[in-house]
Image (cartoon, rainbow, N blue to C red):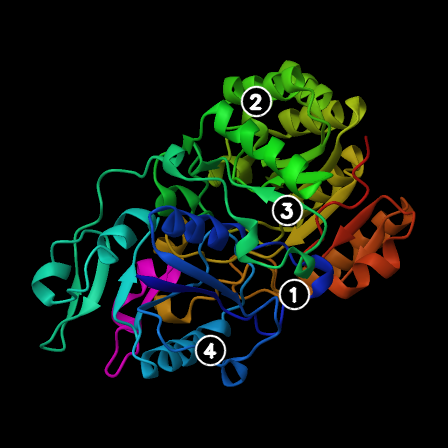
Amino acid sequence: MKVLIINPPNTPFTPKSILIEPIDVLTLASYVKHKGHKVRILDMDAKRLRPENIQMEEGFDVAVIIYDYHIPLHTDAVIDEVFQIAQKAKNFGAKVFLGGKAATHLQEKILIANSPFDVLVANEMEPALMELLGSEDFSDVRLEKITGIAFKSSENKVVITPQRSEKFDLNLLPIPDRNLVDLHDYIDVRTILSSRGCKQRCAFCHVSDFWGIWRGRTVKSVVDEIEYLVQKFHAEKILFLDDNAIADKNRMLAISEEILKRDIKVTLGCLGSISFFDEAIFAKMYTAGFRWIHFGVESGDDTLLRNIHKNITREKIVSAVKFAKNIGFRVRTSWILNLPASDFSSFDKSAELMLETEPDEIRLHYLVLRLGSEYSRQFSGDMQNTNQYIHGSSPSVNLSELDNQELDKKINELLRKLEERGYTVLRQPDEILPKIGKNEKFVSLCPLRYGLNWKI
């Protein structure tokens, strides 16, 4: 089949200063192409296209729209334009599929009367999508046999098939084909997805629910991709965008050893959990070229850390951050400022921990009730009105014991103390490059650019 895979435009557009290649879209598109279908990617965010500006080509059998899949940069306002894009594709005779968190959790609300979507694909998309593309028969009888989807029947009823039980083998994925996009549209950091899922089940996080059990690609396939990016695209910086790249410590050790064995020269970064921190493995990672790590810390209060099932303590945070910094890692930590039951005391503990450890980059977040998370099930009520944008500049929900005005006051006090320690405060993504200059420490209330001051 001829398949158009669409990355919708953000609302507003994602600033060019932080725009990364849509690796989740690239991964899916490359797999579809690998299976023999003709594929084109339309990255509307990168090309600054709104629905009314796109010229939908005729001849596509299927349009697949990816919204809030692996990379959570889209605001909630995007969903209205997703419907408009779907309708345009529908008008040109294409079948229209939607994948991502909304397609997984909000089927009844998306498959409304006159909905332009033919099929919603839940959770990871490859298995169901291959079945859907395997035939031009889109009858109710056939669709009902495909697990992990939802559709509107010929009788105008929403049909949700059983969840797919077997998880997709990530080693079946080819190296993402960057020729499907224009790399000049994105910042100078190539990305890689070497695993899916996480071995933890943090109360605020949707990852374990959405991706299921943690799975990692083989060491060889991961290092093959790193080598490919260096040789073909002259990549100087590569970021593992896995939700937890160090979830299997032995695997990360083996990846580092294989990079050294092949003598690949590149600067690397990754996201990981402090609960899996290991000094010997981080030392080996550093030798292999890793220079940046993002730790989701969330709080400096041990009681709150237990409440959110983080499986770390203040002591462990101090040990991990200081060790990583001392051996040469650039460390980013992220914090959720208004967790349930947080108060003046817990906020002060977080602030004290930031000042004690002085991470190179600090990212301050507000709580979001992500679809599929424990907190979403516990607190959200009407799922349709649940804000899903994790980079909001103000609280979308506040379950702490501090009201928003008190919270703002505490944040401003913290920012003042951090500025006294030499931090640059960033409130908008477009401020990042002009403000950073040679200053290597910053605290942000907005999405941050990857790749700043990574040094070998």
* Viewer-nearest of discs 4 and 1: 4
Total number of numbered discs in the rendering: 4
**Which of disc 3 and disc 4 is earlier in sequence?**
4
Q: Quadrant of residue 84?
A: bottom left
Return the mark for residue 255: 2
Q: Which residue is mark 3?
A: 335
Task: Where is residue 410? Give x, y as percent.
Answer: 73, 56
* Mark 2 or 4, closer to the camera: 2
Give SS at disc 2. helix
How packed mark 1 is, by other alpha carbons closer than 10 Å (few <14, some 14-19, many 20 or more), is some
Mark 4 secondary-structure assignment? helix
Question: N-terminal of the two: label 3 or label 2?
Answer: 2
Determine the secondary structure under disc 1: loop
Q: Position of residue 284 (x, y in %)?
A: 67, 17
Residue type pointed to by label 2 = Ile
Q: Is residue 102 visible?
A: yes
User: What span is in magenta?
Assistant: 97-116
Image-quadrant location for residue 276? top right
- Alpha carbon distance from label 2 to label 4: 41 Å
What residue is shown with label 1?
393
**Along the line of sight, which residue is nearer the eye, 190 or 32?**
32
Instruction: Determine contact: label 4, label 3, CB under 8 Å.
Output: no
Q: Position of residue 252 (x, y in %)?
A: 55, 23
- Residue 170 magenta-drawn? no
Residue at 68 percent across and 41 percent down: it is 333
Measured from the top left, where is residue 189 in percent x and y?
A: 69, 46
Give amino acid for label 3.
Trp
Q: Could you tell me the amino acid type at mark 4?
A: Glu
Q: Is residue 412 left or right of residue 199?
A: right
Does the magenta segment cover residue 114?
Answer: yes
